[in-house]
């Protein structure tokens, strides 16, 4: 509640149902929660990641854009790593991306890069708003295409 975030952890098959339930609940009780970010995740690592991001007072949309950029670069540089997922964490005050795949990979993300991407996409992020419950790499990919 301190960070005005609600993260729902559901299985992959329940995402659509959870989205519908969230929307119905707000309408039924006529209680919008301005300023609250609502997210849905489908694995424990993503739940842990969202907790870290919001605890650090970061924008998970910006983090997902960064993850996508690093994923493409790492996939090109180390194609036999077969990266299946990328997770954000903070260690020793540094932003780190851990790549899950056939080879252990990680990368430090400069804080300045986070700030630069946040600034560069500020208008577009403001325009799309922060109402999407599914903010992940797929979200970032669609956002960058738009």
Image (spheres, rainbow, N blue to C red):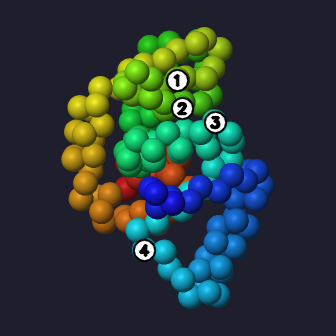
- Whether residue 109 is situated above or below residue 134 in the rendered picture: above
The mark that comes first in sequence, 3 or 4, is: 4
* Earlier sequence position, callout 4 versus callout 2: 4
Label 4 environment density (alpha carbons within 10 Å; few <14, some 14–19, many ≥20): few
Q: Which mark is residue 98?
A: 1
Relative to 52, is 69 on the left or the right?
Answer: left
* Mark 2 / mark 3, whichever is N-terminal: 3
Residue 16 image point, x, y percent? 70, 64
Residue that appears at 70% across and 65% down: 18
Q: Is residue 93 visible in the rendered structure shown here?
A: yes
Along the polypeptide, which appears first: circle 4 or circle 1?
4
What secondary structure is found at the residue carrying circle 1?
strand
Q: How far apart are marks 4 and 2 (CA)?
A: 28 Å
Which residue in the structure is indicated by mark 3? 45
Q: Looking at the picture, does residue 80 appear above or below residue 112?
A: above
Callout 2–callout 1 Cβ contact below 8 Å: yes
Real-space Cα separation, disc 3 to disc 1, in angstroms? 11 Å
Residue 73 showing in the rendered view: no
Frontmost residue, 61 versus 44:
44
Image disc number at residue 34: 4
Quarter the C terminus occupies: bottom left
Q: Residues within 10 Å of mark 2 (few under 14, many from 20)?
A: some
* Inter-mark Cα distance, 3 to 4: 27 Å
Label placed on residue 87: 2
Residue shown at 44% from the left, 35% from the top: 68
Residue furthest to the front: 2
Say what secondary structure mark 4 lies in.
Answer: loop
The x, y position of residue 99, in whole percent, is 55, 23
Which residue is depicted at the point 46% across and 57% down? 2
Q: Residue 117 carries which label?
A: none
């Amino acid at each position: 509640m301190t960070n005005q975030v609600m993260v729902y952890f559901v299985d992959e098959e329940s995402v659509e149902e959870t989205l519908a339930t969230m929307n119905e609940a707000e309408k039924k009780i006529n209680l919008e929660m301005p300023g609250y970010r609502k997210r849905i995740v489908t694995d424990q690592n993503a739940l842990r990641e969202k907790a870290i991001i919001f605890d650090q007072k970061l924008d998970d949309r910006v983090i997902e854009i960064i993850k996508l950029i690093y994923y493409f670069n790492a996939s090109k540089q180390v194609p036999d790593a077969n990266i299946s997922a990328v997770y954000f964490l903070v260690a020793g005050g540094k932003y780190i991306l851990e790549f899950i795949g056939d080879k252990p990979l990680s990368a430090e993300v400069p804080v300045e890069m986070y700030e630069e991407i946040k600034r560069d996409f500020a208008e577009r992020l403001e325009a799309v708003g922060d109402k999407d419950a599914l903010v992940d790499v797929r979200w970032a990919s669609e956002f960058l295409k738009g």
